[in-house]
Amino acid sequence: MLQALEGSQAVAQAVALCRPQVIAAYPITPQTHIVENISKLVADGKLKCEFISVESEFSAASVVLGAAIAGSRAYTASASQGILLMAEVLFNIAGLRVPLVMTCANRAISSPLSIWNDQQDSMAVRDAGWIQLYCADNQEAVDTTIQAYLIAERTELPVMVCMDGFTLTHTLEGIDIPTQEQVDNFLPAYKFSRTLNPQNPISLGTLVSPDFYSEARHSHHTAILNAQTEIIAVDQEWAKISGRCSGGLLTVEGPEEAKIAILIIGSVYGTLLAAMEEFPEEQPVKLIKLRSFRPFPIDALKAACEGLDDVIVLERAIGLGSGAIVGLEVTAALAELANPPKVHNFAAGLGGRDIPLEMLPRLLATLNEPSDRRLRIIDVELDKLPEEDR
Amino acid sequence: MDFSQLRNKQPRFRGLESGHRACTGCAEALAARLVTEAAGPDVMVANATGCLEIFTTPWPESAWRIPWVHSLFENASAVAAGMEAALKVQGKSTKVLAFGGDGSTFDIGFQSLSGMLERGQNVLYVCFDNEAYMNTGIQRSSSTPHAAMTTTSPPGKERMGKRHLKKDIVSIIAAHHIPYAATTSVAYPSDIRKKVRRAMAIEGPTFLQIHCPCPLGWGHEGYKSIEIARLAVQTGLFPLIELERGGLAGVMPLRNIRPVVDYLKEQQRFRHLFTDELRAKEELEHIQAIADHNIEIYNLRSDGHKDAFDSEGMDTVRRGGMRWA
Amino acid sequence: MIEIRIHGRGGQGNVVAAYLLAMAAFEEGRYGQAFPNFGAERRGAPVIAFVRIANEHILRRNQVLTPAFLIIQDQALLHVSGVTNGLLPGGKILVNSPQSSDELSQQLGKEVISIQASLLAKKILGRPVPNTALLAAFFALTGMLSQKSLRKVLQHKFQGIVLEKNLLLIQEAVGLVPAGIWQSEETNVASS
């Protein structure tokens, strides 16, 4: 049944349904409502767990690491500067192959200071060795959070559930919260193969010489790539219980005959879908929603883009000094096709700039303009800059 | 008796086995063994990055016989806090220990340590204090004593080693009003054991600072580690004290107080203090003044009082007058 | 789909008003979406919230630039640049103000209804928080959603004496505006 819930409130409830035993978090906009709602559930006795209000994001990530290796399901959430402060621990968690789940309430990175939404934060830690799943709406955020625990615990890889800050976290909309019974049937009790136990003492996080480091990296990399199967399977298993898919690795929407696709990541999906209805006179377009950025689903992407003439990638972050982040990975993946489509890379909506419906015709119009293979910030207003900075 | 068989006849638990890669005379390795022996098998350790972590676990080997994790340099307290929370929810009584050197305790991990203490978590934090970043090749830390030479506080025309004072970490820890914080030294094994047992018995955050000479970093022969550690105590430069809820609860009295030069002259890190230069003499006076100050504020003088148990090298902790710990 | 923009100041319950509106839509089996304009909200600072109400699932997440209705919680904001921007032709403005509706309509050249929501709230709640009174008036004017739904969502949001006083407040507020004069084919939502 649909309930009118704020995204953060819904995610807090989803987390509680997964019965985490330890939660640690440090407040940062726009993640705060999630942990506030969890705190309330704990205070009201609706969620039995140790909620640890730590003194930094660095410790938040470290506490959940400790909890998970000591045998408890754990959860944390952060955003922006918090993700960057956590960065060292995030790499460490992944390298230790600890099955943790965290929410990233995507927000821009300072400086200049911005509390608003883009995806520079999670993109900055894309190579930390975590699975990264991006949510298009709050229902996906709820379902993906629940799925994330199963994916993490099956693959022994941490999962970062990325949801756009404010655009999702602070938006009230209709969301179906699954029942406890549904989640219990889906998610077995927490298990971690290297749980610390005095009866069988092991050492975790040891020093590895050059003789073994490459092998450790190889097995980690392979594990993330192989997680594609699990991401798809878990989405389907949850669909059997909930009746809803969150989109596996990626989904393609739009007319079969379309020769153009727009690839997006995150909550701009709905706005572009609405735009496709709003501007029916535009040429037919497919909308590719990339849910799994890590693992990067090269094969699924190639299959989705086979036969297309143009792929427009619209992303919410920028590889300063290079260009697109998602876009260049898409470009590289599609280059493996016999007749690769032309990839056009754009960033928009940086630091919370609104992406209006008119973004769709604006993007399509670029196909007649000189190519933007590296990246162009499509909604930049150059007249605000001094001449020499344009 | 065949002494080679002696070890086999000892039934006591060893948390840290021999065969690890520590330098000869490494006091930290000895202290870690003593701590884990006293703490017993029902423990888990979160170990900060540092020598102890490096020399005990060159993959695929490990010298630990207790569950042990190394995450990062600055988060041992927070990892331990998470382990403690998990065990608490699971209803387990296993005690969590956090190990760190002075770098990870005084400097980079100080924030997460403070947070863990403030939250009152049931963790025994042990700082193996060898007074510099030894793992990276002897750089100064905020624990490095005044005037000591390190690779980042070298003496020269303009400098006489480290310009600043050693951070009074135990007072800062005590200011968190935790149930128990104490200093101890590798030269007094039974003092370590006693203080570990005491901390283990307490439900809540506890803290031990163990003074551990580093032959490489301090510049002395490996066989001299214990002797030098004892001199640090006997000169008053490293007072052995206990604090309960922030208040001084006990000190080890010094029956035979030694001048600081006896301690300093044994170590290459202080060799620039033993020249004819005026500034060298002044620095020696500074250091003696530091020791005198410690003796004064902690009342380390044993008042000429002699009792049967107050012997050198024994655990002679005077608690609230003449009460035995 | 109906789009509404709410302007107020930090502390006036702007986001709460937007959420209550969208929640009321769900009470009636419609779809609602509400979100704040994500400011670093401080007491007294101008804040904006957006609401969409529709008969089908709402896809778009962009800001409401062309609202059919504006709800202004502080009359001083009427004269702040940009506040009335984008109001659709024939769009209506509900404002919390001691000035009369005619006076304001004339000033702005737009259809404005004013009620003294703060005064009424001060009298009944003891605090000059205008949001629920304005919502009640808005529901009455448009007939878009029922007072029953508003009562229901207030019951989700508040409890005890605060709830009782709010229920009394909305009852009084309804009486201050002519019921149904903003009702149109559009407010029946089905249209778009």
Image (spheres, rainbow, N blue to C red):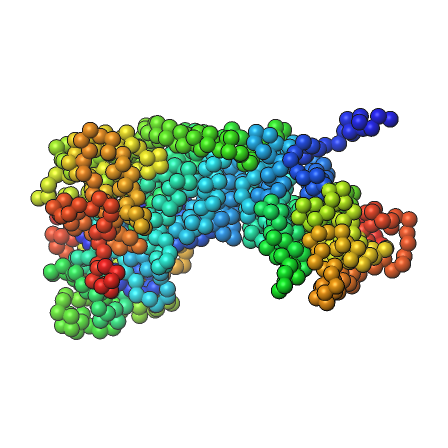
In percent of width and height, residue B83 lies at 56, 40
In percent of width and height, residue A48 lies at 50, 41
Residue B293 visible in the displayed image: no
Identify the residue at image location x=40%, y=49%. A79
Identify the residue at image location x=49%, y=35%. A96
In the foreground, B290 or C94: B290
Identify the residue at image location x=46%, y=32%. A214
In percent of width and height, residue B200 lies at 69, 42
Q: Left or right: B32 with respect to C117?
A: right
Q: Is residue A292 above or below residue A167?
A: above
Q: Left or right: B34 with respect to C52?
A: right
In the foreground, B100 or B276: B276
- Total numbered labels: 0
Q: Is residue C16 above or below residue B5?
A: below
Q: Is residue C98 above or below residue A84?
A: below
Residue B71 visible in the displayed image: yes
Q: Which residue ends up furthest to the left in the rendered image?
A: A281
In the foreground, A13 or B265: B265
Identify the residue at image location x=89%, y=58%. B304
In percent of width and height, residue B64 lies at 64, 33
In the foreground, C19 or B58: B58
